[in-house]
Each structure stands twice: as C-alpha cells, then as structure tokens.
Amino acid sequence: MENRALARNFSGLSTPLIADAALRLQLSILIAPPGIQPVIPGKRLAGRALPAKHFGSVDVFLEAMESASPGDVLVIDNGGRKDEGCIGDLTALEARASGLAGIVVWGTHRDTPELRQIKLPIFSYGSWPSGPQRLDPRSEDALRVARFGAINVTRDDVVFADDDGCIFVSADTVEQILKTAHAIWQKERKQASQIKRGKTLRKQLKFADYLEQRRVNPGHTFREHLREIGGAIEE
C-alpha cells in the first residue's frame, strides 16, 4: 500500500484500533517502548519506515532522505538515549522539504519551539537541550535497520503513531489490519452511539446473561460470551 493510501486509511483510526485489529487477526505487530509522545499533541502519522541509525552526526539522516519516497517516515535509532537531542529544527525542515510524513525517534529531540512552528509530526521520548558530543563508528546497516527498544525496524515496515504511542506493522499485513481496524471502529462507534442514547454497554452486551452463565460455569470467559453474541469489543 502506498504512503498516500496509508495516511488516508489511518485517518479516523488510532493506534489502539490497529493493535486490536492485529490481535483479532492473530498477526504480529511491534509496539514502541512506552513513553513516546508527539511534540505537538494531536499529531498523527502513517507511512513506510525509512530507518536510520544515529552515530552522532546528522549526515546519516540526510543520506536517508536521498532515497526517500514522499510520505515516508524517518525512524531514528538513537539507542534510547536521553542525554542528547539528536534532531532539531534543521533536520525537521529538511525532512519536510524532502516530502517526509514525519519522524519518530528512539531518543530525544531539541529546539522544541521551532519544531512546533514547523508542525511536522515528530514523536520522541522528550527533549534535551544539548546536541550530540560524540562521533561513533558507523555500522554497515545504518540505513537498513533501526532498532527501537527490542524492535528492529526496516523498510518493509509501516509506521503508525498518535497520542497513544507508535506501532510498526509489516507492509505485507497492513492492508488486512487496516480493513479490520475500520470494522472494529464502526462497531465501537455504533456501541458508543447507543450508550449516548441511553442503552448501556451492559445491556448491549447482555452482561447479566454473562454473569448468569459464569455462575453456572465459572470457566466461562467474557471474551467467549462476546464471541457468542457477536459483540466483541476486545479479543
């Protein structure tokens, strides 16, 4: 699926819906370690991963952008370091000029006021005023794989990010996951509308019947009940 279609299909969805869809389909997804946040709350991001390992110099980001396609997401592996802001306003401006959809960083950023003015979706683990004071040897896979916690992200992955976090999905499964996420969203919106009209979720899901079934059969789970009535909100 192309980047434009990814962004369009993710519009109106969320990372929790992507996670729920993958769980329902029993497909693997990779979730970034907790704590990643958008520099500008409310920003959202969807696109193919453009991995880059950071070794102390900005040139690796510029080189990654040389081969970028419009709508790609720069995924930066800075080892989860919080003692250096590995990107700032110039990298963000260059990413925007290169047509990137945004940036996600396993590490921190700086130049926060400028980044907010630039308005490119950027996700990181916070801010730090000092830039890198090091220059480490560059690995051969610097532009092929970006580590993100225990995750290895490649160009075969798709990035989804919002206020709830960041998820990486294999491009081979993304279409199926998005389709299922839309179906879950429609069901949940219908349930939400009924709650607002006075029909509680307990009534919709026949919760009293579930409690009675559980009384008779203590091993009967709520998920089994939901599958029986076709009202699954979790899997």
Image (cartoon, helix red, strand yellow):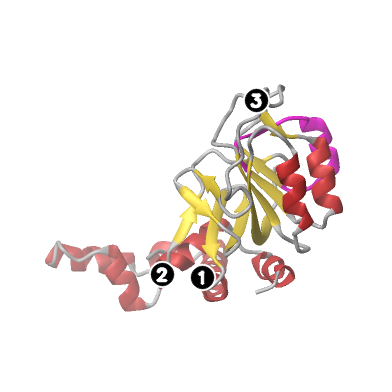
Whether residue 71 is situated above or below residue 230 in the rendered picture: above
Amino acid type, residue under disc 2 in the picture: Arg
Magenta highlight range = 105-121
Amino acid type, residue under disc 1 in the picture: Ile
The mark that comes first in sequence, 2 or 3, is 2
Q: Mark 1 sits on what residue?
A: 184
**Which of the two marks, 3 or 1, is nearer to us in this view?**
3
Whether residue 67 is situated above or below residue 63 in the rendered picture: below
Q: Position of residue 1 (x, y in %)?
A: 65, 74
Most foreground residue, 200 or 146: 146
**Which of the two marks, 1 or 2, is nearer to us in this view?**
2
Whether residue 113 is situated above or below residue 186 in the rendered picture: above
Q: Mark 3 sits on what residue?
A: 134
The residue tagged with tag 3: helix, strand or loop? loop
Q: Residue at x 51, y 47 (%)?
A: 32
Most foreground residue, 89 or 9: 89
Say few, some or many: other residues with alpha carbon within 10 Å of mark 2 (under 14 / 14 to 19 / 20 or more).
Answer: some
The residue tagged with tag 2: helix, strand or loop? helix
Is 145 magenta? The answer is: no
Say few, some or many: other residues with alpha carbon within 10 Å of mark 1 (under 14 / 14 to 19 / 20 or more).
Answer: many
Q: In this view, does 108 lie to the left or right of 222?
A: right
Distance from the alpha carbon under mark 3 to that under mark 1: 47 Å
Asked whether disc 2 touches disc 3, contact meaning CB atoms under 8 Å apart, the reply is no
Q: Mark 2 sits on what residue?
A: 24
Q: In this view, does 194 lie to the left or right of 120?
A: left
